[in-house]
């Protein structure tokens, strides 16, 4: 197995294909690009100065943060939202992390650190992390097509990779690896079979492998893909448009 090159975290892009023998274009980090006046700059500026803060307010108002806080005894609120609500916080972290590469935003940085602390307090000793199913242990991994457990895990992994590539801090990355290790213990050849009803964890596991060099994450991505399409070429794209795009 080829040894992954140790590319400094500051130089890694949204995807990191540096170690691929097939890549032709070298990805650059977000911090290496500056938008000039035009279509994108005002929208990116508004995302940094307005949208991230308003989205965090919505995460609080809709109970997404309370769902995590309840698990560590810091909230008595009932679970609210969809079974996939955890992914809303993870996607906020991913967006905030990439934004901090080009803007100095102490308020957003504080929110980000607080969100990561909340997530850490909700993670189980076995690495499992899902605010809906953590209290429903007998239902875990029983409805892969609709539960979105693996989908949420994938967004956690993407958030952790983004946070590490933007800050160099590995707190969230360690949590992601702990959960990924748990998934690798549960699924795979000779273990539990199946695949996520909503793809997403596959590309997240690949990027987690690129970030850590832990090959079992790459192998697990391959396992889920083969479970999804079978050991044959896929000649036609069928079904749910968003899910098909994630899988592609």
Image (tube, rainbow, N blue to C red):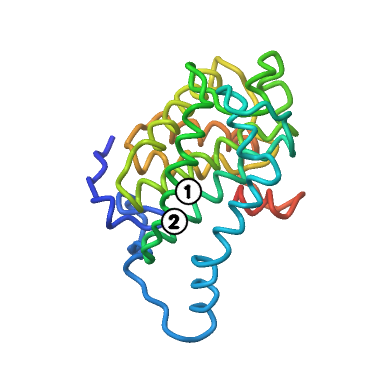
What count of labels does the image hold? 2
Q: Position of residue 166 (x, y in %)?
A: 35, 53
- 213 lies left or right of 57: left
Which residue is under mark 2? Answer: 107
Query: Which of 202 and 235 lies nearest the eye of the viewer?
Result: 202
Neighbours of disc 2 within 10 Å: few (<14), some (14-19), many (20+)? few
137 up-or-down from 168: above or below: above
Is there CB contact under 8 Å for labels 1 and 2? yes
Q: x, y percentage for residue 161?
A: 41, 45
State how far apart marks 1 and 2 are (Cα).
Answer: 6 Å
**Quadrant, the N terminus:** top left
Question: Would residue 220 appear left or right of 132 to someone viewing this image?
Answer: left
Q: Nearer the viewer, residue 92 or 147?
A: 92
Circle 1 sits on which residue? 111
* Residue 235 x, y percent position in the rendering: 67, 51
Q: Is residue 9 left or right of residue 241?
A: left
Q: Residue at x 38, y 64 (%)?
A: 30
Q: SS for tag 1?
A: helix
Point 49% across, 23% down: residue: 184
Vertical side of 190 occupied by 95: above or below: below
Q: Position of residue 113 (x, y in %)?
A: 42, 43
Near-viewer residue (195 or 181)? 181
Rate crowding at label 1 as few (under 14), some (14 to 19) or many (20 or more) other CA atoms within 10 Å. some
Q: Residue at x 27, y 55 (%)?
A: 10
Point out which mark residue 17 bears.
none
Residue 187 lies in what quarter of the image? top right
The residue under the point 36% across, 46% down is: 164
């Amino acid at each position: 197995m080829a040894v992954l090159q140790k590319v400094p975290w500051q130089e890694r892009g949204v995807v990191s294909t540096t170690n691929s023998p097939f890549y032709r274009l070298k990805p650059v980090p977000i911090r290496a690009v500056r938008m000039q006046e035009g279509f994108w700059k005002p929208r990116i500026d508004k995302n940094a100065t307005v949208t991230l803060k308003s989205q965090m307010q919505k995460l609080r108002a809709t109970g997404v943060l309370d769902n995590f806080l309840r698990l560590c005894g810091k909230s008595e609120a009932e679970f609210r939202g969809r079974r996939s609500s955890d992914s809303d916080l993870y996607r906020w972290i991913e967006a905030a992390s990439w934004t901090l590469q080009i803007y100095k935003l102490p308020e957003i940085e504080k929110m980000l650190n607080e969100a990561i602390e909340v997530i850490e307090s909700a993670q189980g000793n076995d690495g499992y992390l899902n605010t809906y199913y953590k209290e429903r242990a007998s239902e875990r991994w029983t409805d892969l097509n609709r539960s979105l457990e693996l989908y949420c895990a994938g967004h956690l992994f993407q958030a952790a990779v983004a946070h590490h590539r933007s800050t160099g801090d590995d707190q969230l990355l360690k949590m992601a690896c702990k959960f990924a290790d748990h998934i690798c213990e549960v699924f795979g050849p000779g273990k539990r079979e199946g695949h996520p009803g909503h793809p997403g964890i596959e590309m997240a596991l690949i990027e987690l492998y690129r970030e850590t060099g832990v090959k079992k994450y790459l192998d697990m991505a391959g396992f889920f893909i083969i479970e999804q399409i079978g050991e044959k070429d896929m000649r036609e794209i069928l079904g749910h448009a968003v899910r098909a795009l994630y899988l592609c």
